[in-house]
Amino acid sequence: MNKVLTYVLLALAAASFLYPFVWMISASLSSEAGLGDLRLLPVEPTLANYRTVLERIPLGRAFLNSVFVVTVTTTLVLILGAMVGYALARLEFRGKQLLFFAIIFTMTLPFQITLIPNYITMVRLGWVDTYLALIVPFVMNSFAILLFRQAFMGLPQALIDAARMDGAGELRIIFQILVPNILPTVVTITILTFMGIWNDALWPLIVVRDESTMTMPQLVTLFSVGGRADSQLAVKIAAAVMLAVPVIILYLFFQKHFIRSMASSGLKD
């Protein structure tokens, strides 16, 4: 009976999370008149909402911009995070603990606090309306550094010592010896970074005004609140579905590694 009750509660919890997504997809395939009923199946099924989105905004170019920005940013986060995390986990140098605590402290600061200083920096560097403004402020990720540090500390020191005896340098130790042994952590950082950059609309709205450089979340936001949707709710929902699909696909492919890393990521001193 306890097991049955547990599964019933879990099923209800899962349904409460899944229902908005299922309804969103159903609403995007419904006519505007059919949105009044909260049904799980489309009312008067149609693809006109998606055609309207593609006709009114250059979503293809925005999708490519987002893919480029996310790919470059995520790659740099993985490379730099692994290097800094390795240094904090395995190297000895003066001020290491102070540096680590400073990195942890930055995790407590909301992004809005650094919004204006970052924008002023982008203006002075002349990076407004460029991809650099969308990439550079996010390549050093404190959470990624923390996860890499904890993962590296969980590996045996003998593995590093053996690699050094074979003549391997520090970079080779990091990327050829250690990183292949912490793939769940790498996948977790990849998914979290991808989701964070892909869904970010606030920062692009501030630093990018040229439509040819806009990312997909930024363009969808402007489309929804800027008047191009003509107050058509079904069209706005269709744009939101197109924005959410890449993240859902990425998670479905890597969910096993993601869950494994979340379940095994204990913090070590």
Image: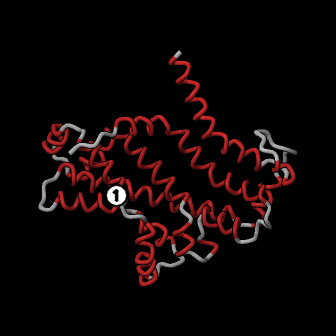
Q: Nearer the viewer, residue 191 or 177?
A: 191
Provide residue 178's location: percent of width, then percent of height.
27, 43
> Image point 39% across, 57% down: which residue?
77
* In this picture, residue 156 sits left or right of residue 25: left
The three-letter amino acid code for the residue at tag 1 is Ser
Q: Badge 1 is on which residue? A: 142
Q: Secondary structure at mark 1?
A: helix
> Image point 76% across, 50% down: which residue?
28
* In this picture, residue 5 sits left or right of residue 135: right
Q: Quadrant of residue 45?
A: top right
The quarter of the rendered structure image containing the C terminus is: top left
Q: Quadrant of residue 230?
A: bottom right
> Image point 80% across, 55% down: which residue?
49
Give the residue furthest to the top: 1
Image colouring: secondary structure
- Give neighbour class at mark 1: few <14, some 14-19, many 20+ (Cα, 10 Å): many
Give the residue furthest to the bottom: 124
Provide residue 194's location: percent of width, then percent of height.
49, 53
Provide residue 90's location: percent of width, then percent of height.
18, 49
> Image point 39% across, 62% down: which residue?
139
* In this picture, residue 6 sits left or right of residue 25: left
* In this picture, residue 29 sits left or right of residue 167: right
Relative to 230, does residue 10 appear above or below in the rendering? Answer: above
Q: Quadrant of residue 99?
A: bottom left
Relative to 228, does residue 97 appear above or below in the rendering? Answer: above
Provide residue 264's location: percent of width, then percent of height.
35, 35
Q: Nearer the viewer, residue 91 or 109?
A: 109
